[in-house]
Image: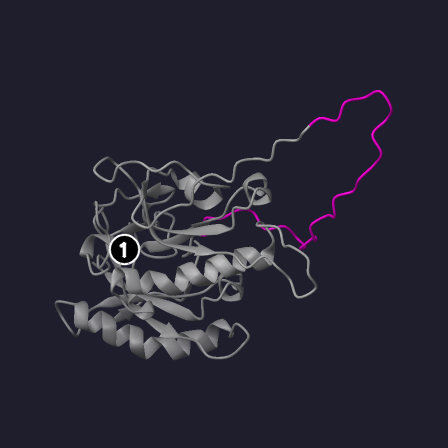
Amino acid sequence: MRRLPLLALVAALALGGCTSPSDGEPPATTPSTSATPTGTVPTETVPPDPGPDPRVGECHALSFGQAVAVVGRTAPVPCRRRHTAQTYFVGRLDLETEAGFTRRVDSRAAQRQARQACTTRLPQHLARTPRELRLSMARAVWFTPSPRRAEAGADWFRCDLVVVAAPEQLLRLPRRTQGWGGTPAIAMCATAAPGTAQFARVACGGRHSWRAVTTVDLPGRRLPRQAAIAARMESSCRDAARAQADDPLDFVWSQESPTREQWDAGQRYGICWAPA
């Protein structure tokens, strides 16, 4: 029985497609008035059009870059055509503060609302538990109106499902994704042993040689030391790898801990890997 050494997680597991949050939450400015100079004709400012709201069930042909960086709404495409994202929830942002000011749609507070709503609703959409989705390449991404649309009254946020097929590549989705979370093709696999130069996360529907087999919760508010993580994960990883092996007396496994960035973002678990 052999165990590969403890490895640090080298790629972020979660995608966040949203507007870039601003550092602060500046209040909306109060319109000012001034006297019209004599002899001039005042001009009327035409307000921007808030545009239509997104709808649940819409499909979108997003690139990887659009999925992580889109500001505003992308045009939907017919779901019978090639698409990489599907909207599973549309909500409303609460932009009013207790002090009576209006938050920007790209403020941290507004983006936090969208993130929490989208990530908590994804398991229900895919008919999987949050723990089960840890071993999937399915991700929630979210979008909010552009600041100009928000000024005209748009206050929606849109939750889309995407599946990371390979580095910077999204998987083509079926017409309907509700209840689709158990599909083996979207499980988390890798092209090589974690920590090696050839390692890359891929959906199991693509070419792969390793598979994520279980996760282990890590307690505490601070990221534990590597030795403590290794000790906590070893038994669970060994048992999960043995269950996958042809020979229960000769098998290998690998275990990964979250990076500091991932820990701070909320990933409080390690991942166990075994050869596929």
Q: Is 222 rendered above or below residue 157?
A: below
Q: Quadrant of the C terminus?
A: bottom left
| Other-residue count near label 1 (Cα within 10 Å), few / some / many at <14 / 14–19 / ≥20 | many
- The span picked out in magenta is 16-43
List x then y, in percent, for residue 158. Answer: 42, 50
Q: Residue at x 25, y 45 (%)?
A: 173
**Disc 1: which residue:** 189
Q: Nearer the viewer, residue 170 or 61?
A: 61
Residue 186 relative to residue 76: left or right: left
Magenta: main secondary structure: loop
What's the coloring here? one colour
In the picture as drawn, the residue positioned furthest to the right comes out as 38
Task: Check if residue 26 falls in the magenta segment.
Answer: yes
List x then y, in percent, for residue 93. Answer: 51, 56
Task: Check if residue 87 falls in the magenta segment.
Answer: no
Residue 63 relative to residue 276: left or right: right
Q: Residue at x 43, y 76 (%)?
A: 218
List x then y, in percent, for residue 35. Answer: 85, 34
In the image, what residue type sits under mark 1? Cys
Q: Is 1 rendered above or below residue 193?
A: below
Q: Quadrant of the N terminus?
A: bottom left
Q: Residue at x 39, y 69 (%)?
A: 270
Q: Residue at x 44, y 74 (%)?
A: 229
